[in-house]
Image (cartoon, rainbow, N blue to C red):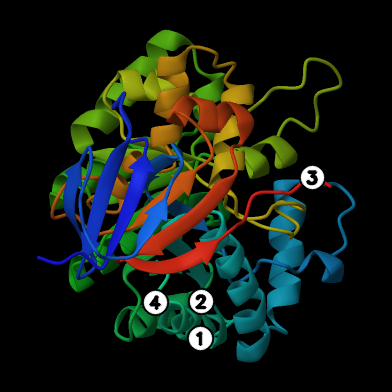
Amino acid sequence: MMPDLVIANARLPGQAAAMDVALADGRIAGIARHIPSDAPRHDANGALLVAGFVECHIHLDKAGILHRASIVEGTLKEAVAETARLKAAFTTEDVYARAAAVVEQAISHGTMAMRTFVEVDPRAGLRSFEAIKAVRAAYAQSIDIEICAFAQEGLTNEPETQALLEAALSDGADLVGGCSYTDPDPAEHIRRIFALAERFGVAADFHVDFDLAPTGSDLPAIIAETERLGWQGRVACGHATKFSTWAPTERDAMADRLAEAGIGVVALPATDLFLLGRSAETLVPRGVAPLMALAARGVVTAVATNNVLNPFTPYGDANLLRMANLFANVSQLARDDDLEAAFAMIGARPAQLLGRPHVLTVGAAADLVLLDAPSGADAVRRCAPVLVGWKRGRLSFERPPAILR
């Protein structure tokens, strides 16, 4: 088969010698030391070629609203209340513009698949959902976007949200999401979210245990429902910051239960660090889920962005390498193997959570990114520049290196 493009002189993970990678019909058609071809060639000049990054937890609908918000306390309670106030005025056009800007940033930083939460409730209605569906369609050539219909404000306290979740799941949402800590009846909230997941045959993704109190975990309820429905491999939990408060024996016991139930854990370090631990006057806790310890017990773990420029996270640029670097700093990682694991937490591991292939082999989708780095570990250490990317073999972005004058 005649290639459409040959990426020449690329460094592949685990390979000592530079390789050529041929692309054809949106897939990897060949990998060899040298691929002779009259097809166009892109000289990688020894840059690292990897499968594209995967953003598994982001909120496009409420990104970019920082200039409208008032942050006084910087707490989770304030962020929830302030965002609830603001989203009542969201329009479809407004959400589209803000979400599209973040998606473009994510693409330019090498992200090629994304799971975004979209809040549907009496304040937002389905306006944000309609906007994110339009964004998904508009950028489909460059990024695959999953939409999670999300009950941020609870369910038992706002029964109108149930019908809105059902409407979204009937009209293009890919999965359902719950937030147990905002519901006065967390166990019933979890049960209802799983009932929707079962009814529509979709995955479930929870915001859970987002505090630093060592008691009152909702993870056991999520594990029980996962096992009861046979939903192993189709459930993820974001934040789970309670894990950082538990002694190793308690932490490991819960990790073993999550691993057996096939439930993944996603740390959101920018948000978790900003919102938590504010009552401590000294020795402020990090409050980030200990992903390395969980991964060692077999839990699928990932690092993600969560929020960008809003009351939950008043900074950000949808750069997953920057988020992996932040996680590595907080987790005090230094060994190459550990940094490679952190690199996998923005690529192979979140892809596993989303049920997506993430390989660089002949026949795989040509969703590829070149990094100015010799290895994934080095890329995490330096937040290495992302140079260029191809989505299904088509050039999707370029970031030319800086030129010193």
Mark toward the start of the polypeptide (4 vs 3): 4
Residue shown at 19%/45% (left/top)? 31
Disc nearest the viewer among 3 and 1: 3
Residue shown at 61%/63% (left/top)? 105
Relative depth, front residue between 65 and 107? 107
Mark toward the start of the polypeptide (4 vs 1): 1
Using the rendered image of the protein, determine whether residue 35 is visible from the camera's viewpoint.
yes
Q: Quadrant of residue 400?
A: bottom right
Q: CB atoms at circles 2 and 3 under 8 Å apart? A: no
Amino acid type indicated by mark 1:
Leu
Give the side of residue 241 with respect to residue 315, left or right: left
| C-alpha distance separating marks 2 and 3 | 48 Å
Q: CB atoms at circles 2 and 1 under 8 Å apart? A: yes
Relative depth, front residue between 329 and 189? 329
Amino acid type indicated by mark 4:
Ala
**Which quadrant is the N terminus positioned in?**
bottom left
Q: Quadrant of residue 364?
A: bottom left
| C-alpha distance separating marks 4 and 3 | 35 Å
Mark toward the start of the polypeptide (2 vs 3): 2
> What residue is shown with label 1?
126
| C-alpha distance separating marks 2 and 4 | 23 Å
Relative depth, front residue between 116 and 27? 27
Q: Position of residue 115 (x, y in %)?
A: 42, 61
